[in-house]
Amino acid sequence: MSRSTFASVQRLAALAAVNLTFPLAIAAQEVTDLTDEQLIRRIEALVPEYEEALAARDARLAAVRTDERRPTPADTVQVGPMRIVTPPDDVDATRTLFEEVWRESFDGLEVSPSLSRHLFVFQWRTRVRSMNVEAAPDRQVINLELERIRTPTVEHAKNEIRDALSRAFTTDFPRMSPMAAWLTAQGHPSAEEMYRLLATQNIGASRACLQGSAIACGATLGFGFGNPAADLAHWFSPQDQRAMVGELARRRDRGIDGDDPLVRSCTGLNDAGACATLLARLQWVSHLPVSDRLRAHALWFAVRLGGEGAWQRALERADAPPSEVLAHVSGLPIDEFLAAWRDEMIANRPDARAGLGGKGTRVLMWSLIFAALAMRSTRWRLA
Amino acid sequence: MYQPMLFIHWKQASVPLLPFVVAAFGLPLVSVQGIDGDLGSGGLMAASSPLAMLSLPVYPILAFLTGAGLALTSWNWDHQQNHVYALSLPLARWEYAMLKMGAGAVLGLIPVTALWIGAHVASAAVTLPVGLTAYPNELGLRFLLAVGLSYALVFAMAAGTMKTNLWVLSGVMAAAVGGTWILAWFGLADAAVQMLWSAGGPFEVFTGNWALIDV
């Protein structure tokens, strides 16, 4: 609005200038009848009018610029435990969007302490404008200022909200806890996307998981290597195992020390047996040749399975190994949980077939419409 | 009457069609490069391999260009000769256009078959792990429909007068340049995209999943 208003003011000024110069042009025809002195007097008489017009133009432009800089007023909306600041005319849409996202993905997470520590600043409009947001020192601001050109649909907007909320929940867990690592910056992964991710991981564990091995699903998520049924040699290539141990040694994490002879054998001498022995000792690892998003998905799935109180249970065991947390949150033994997670993955396998079904009929119909238009061409009549 | 029409179109289209046939056969083979069922380097594989990802938008583009090329070669010689041959035939205009269109449609099967064979060869050339499947038939069918649609669209435009085409193309250009902003301004972008490219729209076949190998 502001830029177009600015342009229209400029156009008005130009019009005014033209209106002023038009009489001058007519007068110019009479110039020959005037003496120099008369001419100068007439020009001088016009100067105040010209200056007045300039002043009016400057005043209007200044008003437009001030209006442009003035922040949009803001209202606050409360949806569940979330406080959202939004422009007054967006209040209803904001409430609807946040309520839908909350109901669909985060129902039962009212206990999250992080939500009361955040303030969501939300706009979803053609041109995002600055808003009068009152400072809230006790709250961290999450900006969700979405332009319609980049976020055209309701579903896009809801995904952005979902991701922002997921990131806010991350701060519920202590910084160094396994769960904080699982959720960091992951957003809220969709089930279909996760199936595709699981199927395209280049590790044997994910393939064994898809084939029905629950313990391999655990290995895909980074735990269960010490299980007697674990088949590390088939789940991870020697390079992958070496990289996993090497990363732990580099960080001196989980008691893995680079000076340990076993670690040196694994990382320096490429001893696959040493790598497997070291990994079998650990309850879980954080560095895996697998997308982090799968782990985030597993946690959100556990929360959904666990129902009421699930998030509270996750917070209670924030420092526990991931397998314990998942079992505690979901309310299922870990093997059952992993089997359920795998079933969930399989159930959400995207319909990837290019097979067209009804689409084929519709494409044929459009082709026939275009063909009919070709039959009705008028070229010959005009040629 | 159909055979001469097919022969004339074949004479016009055989050379221009050749690169499309080669591309249609080769594209599936290129898209499976780098896919290996063996374990090794970690990370992603198959449907997510760089060449597979790069080739995804190329399939619909190739389909459109193939259909458009066929349609243009169908009318080009006719326009150049001021329709003398067409007017000398004892046929109504619509009959002539239908025969001409049918001839082009048959020629369109050549690149489609090339792609279908290429997709089968490419699928057979790689070992796919559990969870991934090759879809050569579905890809071939989608390519066939996309070629058919773009052929019909460009055929209809080429059959029209220059004036009509100028109007249509100007409208499309104006919509492409200004339409997005205008629609976004009124919050109608979703509806417009839905109308043209999603289910039921004329161009829906060009969107969606063009992956030869997928989950």
Image (cartoon, coloured by chain):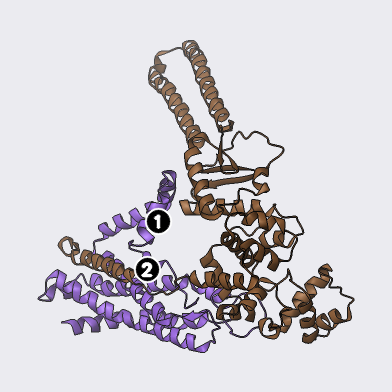
Residue at image x 49%, y 20%? Answer: A53
Side of B32 relative to A136 (left or right): left
Q: Residue furthest left?
A: B90
**Is residue B72 toward the left or the right of residue A169 in the image?**
left
Decide if residue A100 is on the left or right side of residue A243: left
Please determine whether, in this image, residue A142 is positioned above or below residue A5: below
What tint does the image give chain B? purple
Q: Amino acid at mark 1?
A: Val
The 10 Å Cα crowd at callout 1, few under 14, some 14 to 19, many 20 or more, is some
Q: Position of residue A231 (x, y in %)?
A: 68, 84
Query: Please, is residue A17 above or below residue A84 in the view?
Result: above
Left or right of A360 on screen, residue A304: right
**Residue at 24% across / 84% down in the picture?**
B7
How far from the left and from the top, in percent, is residue A215?
64, 77
The answer to which of marks 2 and 1 sits earlier in the sequence is: 1
User: Disc 2 to disc 1, how far (Cα)?
Assistant: 13 Å
Q: Does any portion of residue B15 appear in the rendered image?
A: no
Chain letter matching colour brown:
A
Residue closer to the observer: A91 or A79: A79
Q: Could you tell me which secondary element the residue under label 2 belongs to?
A: helix
Q: Which residue is mark 1?
A: B193
| SS at mark 1 in the image | helix
In the figure, residue A25 lies in which quadrant?
top left
Type of amino acid under label 2: Val
Mark 2 = which residue?
A: B205
Query: On screen, B168 above or below B39?
Result: above
